[in-house]
Image (cartoon, rainbow, N blue to C red):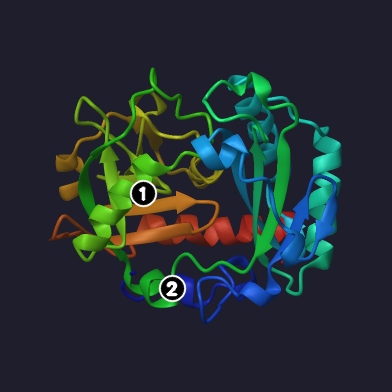
Amino acid sequence: MHTTDPASESTPAAATPPPVTARETADSTRYWINGRLRPEQEATVPVTDHGLLYGDGVFEGIRFYGRRPFRLDAHLRRLADSCRAIRLTLPYTLDRLARAVAEIVDAFPADDGYLRLLVTRGAGPLGIDPSGCLRPNVILIAARLQMVDEAHRREGIRLVVAATRRLPGDALDPRIKSLNYLNQILARMEADHAGAQEAVLLNGQGRVAEASAENLFIVRDGTLLTPRTADGALEGITRGLVLELAARLGIPAREAPLTPYDLHTADECFLSGTGAGLIPVREVDGRPLHHCPGPLYSRLEAAFQEQVRRECGA
């Protein structure tokens, strides 16, 4: 997804998505459901679970490096907030969930990987009324997931602005990590059809919200800009870390209302997300950017990798 970047060439492999030949290596995947580790054949939930029937539930994606989860407390707090926002009772304390994370990471066959933590409304009668769902299901999946191949990490990805618009905040608050990702899936399908790797979603007013699965940053005249949460951007944990690192490095950074024009004329552009890390962008809607990977991206990527090493020892 980019041009060559000396900084990225020296980055230790431990802080990048683990290399795998397929997107997921099924035989290494581990499952924890409702209090205990389970073999794959027992990793099931009822077909009447409202998470399956209606997307009624929330989730978090968490990276671990050197068998240590990265920014786990922040992810668990956001999960609890998402549950409260949709009146979904979390049946475990956050301390118990942290122990569950440790259990599944210990059982995982590799030091680095990705966790998906889900809380569904649980089984209930058909119909959208959740009152008949008596017990939520809590699911943890540990997998080797490579969201970005190394060629794209070096050379940058292509973005397209999707016709699919971001759901407005008064329809679904972007701070809720909802299981229902159909909005983003439709946008990603547009990117696939256009031969691009990611899609950018605009809000109803034509301002940039985010990519289908990541937050977005641009650089203009030495300043780092990212879409406002008021315009539909998720308050991403990696996004927040990028802003912390920018402040530490003395890079001017702020939220700003952005339009496709701002993306087309940016000096640099990159994406951030838990699963993917930082991803440089080389082209938006067929328009090559000036730098990929750019100098500010390279500084922030190096600082990001150092933060992972500091917190996880990887």
For marks 2 and 1, the one nearer the N-term is 2
Is residue 93 found left or right of 74 in the rendered image?
right
Judge the density around disc 2: few (<14), some (14-19), many (≥20) Cα neighbours within 10 Å.
Answer: some
Q: What residue appears at the point 73 percent right and 65 percent down from the top-left corner?
A: 41
Query: Any mark on residue 149, and which?
Result: 2
Q: Nearer the viewer, residue 128 or 298?
A: 128
In this rendering, is residue 166 above or below 280? above
Q: Nearer the viewer, residue 8 or 30?
A: 30
Image coordinates of residue 100 in percent, x first then y, are: 82, 49
Q: Quadrant of residue 169?
A: top left
Is residue 59 found left or right of 260 in the rendered image?
right
Q: What residue appears at the point 68 percent right and 27 percent down from the top-left corner?
A: 133
Q: Amino acid at mark 2?
A: Asp
Q: Amino acid at mark 1?
A: Ile
> Whole-Å distance between the Cαs marked 2 and 1?
20 Å
Is residue 204 found left or right of 156 in the rendered image?
left
Q: Is residue 313 visible?
A: no
Quadrant location of the C terminus in the rendered image = bottom right
Q: Secondary structure at mark 2?
A: loop
Judge the density around disc 1: few (<14), some (14-19), many (≥20) Cα neighbours within 10 Å.
Answer: some
- The residue that disc 1 covers is 185
Quadrant location of the N terminus in the rendered image = bottom left
Image coordinates of residue 257 in percent, x first then y, are: 27, 29
Is residue 127 found left or right of 159 in the rendered image?
right
**Looking at this rendering, what residue extends furthest in the bottom direction?**
21
Callout in the foreground (2, 1): 1
Q: Quadrant of residue 108?
A: bottom right
Q: Secondary structure at mark 1?
A: helix
Query: Any mark on residue 174, and which?
Result: none
Image coordinates of residue 149 in percent, x first then y, are: 43, 73
Q: Quadrant of residue 34?
A: top right
